[in-house]
Image (spheres, rainbow, N blue to C red):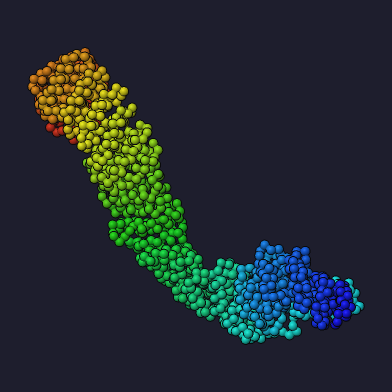
Amino acid sequence: VDTASLALLIPSLHRGLRSRSTVEKKKAAAIVGSICSHVSDPSDVVPYVDTLIMDLRVLLLDPIPEARRVSAKALGALSTNVGEGHLPDLLTWLKMSLGKSTLSSAERSGIAMGLAEISACLSAERLDTLLEEIIFTASWSKLPAASKEGAMFLAACLPVALHSSFESMIPSVLPIIIRGLADDSEVVREAAQLAGQSMVFAFGKSSTDLLLPSLLSGMNNGYWRIRTSSVELVGDLMMGLAGVPPVKMGILAGMVLSVQNVEDEEAEDDENAPEEESSEDGEDGDEMEVDLTPAYAVSPETVSRVLTETLGEKMKRVILSNIYICRNDVSQKVRVAAMQVWKKCVFNTPKTLRDTLPQTIDIIVESLGGVNEEKRSAASRTLGDLVSKLGDAVLLEVLPALQRGLSDEDQAVKRGSYEGLEELIRNATKEQIQNFSKQILATLDNAVSDSVEEVRSSSAEIFSLIVRSISMSEVERFINQLVTKVSSSDAEASAQRLHALDGLQKILQACGPKVVNHVVPKLTSERPLSLPNALTISVAIQASGEDFEQYLEQTVAALLYVCVKANAPEVNPVEIASPVIRAICASSEDMTNKLFFSVGNALMSAQMNSRIAGAVLLGAVCVSAPKIAEFKAQSILESMIRQFSDSKHDAVLAAADALVCFTTSVPVETTVSFIPMIRQNIRVAASSSISQSAKNSLVGLENMQGVAPFVPVITHGLLNGSPTDREQCALALAEIVALSTAAALKPFTIKFAGPVIRVMAERNPWQVKAAVLLAIDELLVTAGAGLKAFAPQLQSTLLKNLVDPSKLVRNRSKRGLGELCVILPRSGPLLKELVKLASLDENSVAAKVTVLQTLGLVLSRCSKVDDAVYEEILESALNSTRSVEQAEREACAAIYGGLSVHSSAQQLTSLVSSLLVLSENNETSTLHGVGQALHAVLFTATRKEINLESALLPQLVALAENMSRHDTAIIRGSAAKIASGVLVFSHFSEASMIDLVQRLITTDSSLDVIVCGIDACSPMVTEELKPKNMTTLFHTLLDLSLDERPEVQIGADYAMKEILVDGRTVRVTLYERVLKASDAKQAGYLKNYVQKLKALPDRDAE
């Protein structure tokens, strides 16, 4: 065709492309596509390209599929012959139109056909860029559905357009197509299906090895739509290998298969048919699917033979295995699609299943080990189907395969193998399980202690299934093997022991009472109970819950027996009992209460071993279940502290160890709140202990194990508690120290001293200070030597509180200083501080009195007093003797007594002479002070056996006689004290002194004088006293004990107690002498009266 002829043809072609007739449009497009081959130079067509391209672009959007196909071919031919350079906007327009949402699917398919034909003439680099821009972005989830549909259409058209050039792109394009099968948009899924069919049809025979990996992966995908389409595509592939084309193709059928529907074309060629009808038929054409069913049918035997020849036996089995698994898919559509493909390819199902069994098992195991629930369900159903169809044969094949999977290092494969085994057992008959029980149990032996929890759970479930079919001897043998693993002593197997224990628990939970009822009685009958059996019992409790209550009594009995063996080196009762106790306490409140009831009965048993076992078990409860111990704190503390008075040393130590377990397990803040109750139980235990022995101590507190449990509680309460807690902790400390010994307190003295000193340095209520001072006093009394390092701090603290407004605080500070001076290396500084305090005018009278009493107490207890200090104290005492305050004068007497302790005979004579000179002053206050002082000096001199000059005794007697007739009652009372001192010192003028005292207590009108006289009587009655004088004084006091005045009666009682009773023992000599001098009536009364005197508390008790 020359240029002139071409000029004549183009207008006709232009009109043909715009014709309403589909036939004319197709023929015109076909001529345009081939026109370049009919001209001598393709460049002759260039002037007409723009006109033709515009018409072909319109035709690409035609409703008729064949018209779109021919138009796309024409565009491809023009691009190839005239070059893309003469079509500058075509490629851009095609790419932009492919993803337009305003186009229909039919129009978008035409755009895809055109773009595929154009891409055939692109360079490799430009083609890769095109695929990157369009197809590879189809996996983006945020892209519009129209863009993804266009990309799938392009992927469907490229295999036909590019032919062998597309083969290298299959591995990268096919996975994208398969992902498109699961898209949310239906049109995208349909386009992806067409793309897959196109690729399978185009490259099914030539590139099978490139298609199968992606298709098999799609069959195992987690989305059912992908699995369905993948099965159908695999079916198309296998049928294509057998020479059968795909059964159905959609709107791309003409492009993909390059065939025409003859019947439609003949209808359109009919000249009598109106063009409008042709157009309407064309519009409906994209809604129809082209049936390309071949005229011949291929048998399954032929398909199977062809597959073996083309793919090989191994690949064929892999494909059939995957199809068979899809037959058991959870999705009905997948099952239907797989069933249709299976029927086309398989002619003997049982034989095929046996041939493909290894591959099927491998896929099943892998699927069971995955995370996708649908795949795992399909694999399980497949395995059950295999067992039901193949019977024993499948067990022979499946068990070895599963065992290989169980030993695989891949945890997912291992987990899947166990799930497969579980499904196999579920579908096996009882006879099959019995026949293969050894293999199954051997497989489960390691499974129950596997490191993967899912594997252990599956193994337990499997065991619960087979336990219904196997004998109890096999069950017992299997449990014993598992218990042996639990008891392994290998340090490297600690993790395996935990896994075995967890597996055992899961087995007991899964099997229920049948196994528990068989195992537990045998375990609890062991004596002594071993750790493995204890662990087994614990998991049995966890598995049974409240149903285990029927075995609780014998379990506790086994634990108590272990606790009796607590001293054996190979037995650790806490370690053995702990898992069982934890399980009991975690199961139910009723079982916990029954456990404590059983322990309580053991603690109250008459057998020492039972009491020891109860204490040890109670300690194990504290260690194993701290929350329960905290909840039962009151009961535990009461039981353990009461056992501190046990007569058996081992039982006491066991209780102490249990208390240590309690205080270390329960939060110390909780224990502090129980301090009042602890004090009460300590007092109860102490009263029982003291009544059993003559010692004033508690048996449990006589060793450091008994003191140790209270140390952290008391120190925490003192340092961090509220004022009430501090007071109670201090009182508890005082009581514990008072009932303990120096040896038991030695390790804890410093731990106690620090907190009490710190508390006293802070601002606290007087109740707290009084309680802490009591604790300090008791520490100084019992463990004074251990507090030497704290002596300066204690001295400062006690001196500070000696002038406190509270009388109780002052008195306890006085007692503490009296004990502290014993451990001080030098008492001079302390005495000087006391003298200084006594001279301060700002102190109250009560405070001065306490200071003076303390000074006298320290003087009487310290080892040495320097002369300078002696003189300073004496001067202070003489000043206080003349004080106008009676209390100060009476308190000053203690100072004179203390000075007498450190006085020589010459100093004592000088001291008495000074007092006699001072008595010449007839002032009432001075006479009273002298009387009190002389009483103290004379009694101290008597005790220390210091001699006075004999000339002083008549002066003392005369002074007493003069004072006894004084008008003031307190002077007359002092006269009785002087007379008592003189009589005790030398028995000088014995008769006159006794007459003086008797006259005062019988005839004086002042009650205070009578009481003072009664108090003076008790020192006077000694064995050296003449019988007549003794009888006189004694009968006088005995008569006064019946006096109606309470003060007189109480004074007489205490005087008689001091005469006749020493502690709780009667002074036999004096008692018998008095009985001889008494008549029958007095003697009878005296016998009963002595018993009353024994029960009287000490005079100086608080």
215 shown above or below 841: below
Which quarter of the figure has residue 427?
bottom right
Q: Is residue 1086 visible?
A: no
Which quarter of the figure has residue 73?
bottom right
851 shown above or below 793: above
Q: Can residue 587 be seen in this view?
A: yes
Give x and y (percent) for residue 1008: 24, 19
* Front in this rendered view, residue 19 or 884: 19
Q: In this figure, what is the number of numbered marks?
A: 0
Give x and y (percent) for residue 727: 36, 36
Which quarter of the figure has residue 1025?
top left
Residue at the (43%, 61%) spot, across then down: 539
| Left or right of 962 on screen, residue 283 | right
* Front in this rendered view, residue 185 or 571: 185
Give x and y (percent) for residue 317: 59, 81
Q: Quadrant of the C terminus?
A: top left
Q: Quadrant of the N terminus?
A: bottom right
In the rendered image, the residue lying farthest to the right is 272
Residue at the (33%, 61%) spot, across then down: 528
179 shown above or below 804: below
| Left or right of 510 on screen, residue 607 | left
Residue at the (55%, 69%) spot, across then down: 370
Residue at the (24%, 40%) spot, across then down: 788
* Front in this rendered view, residue 1068 or 567: 567
Give x and y (percent) for residue 872: 20, 25
* Front in this rendered view, residue 223 or 75: 75
| Left or right of 1072 on screen, residue 646 | right
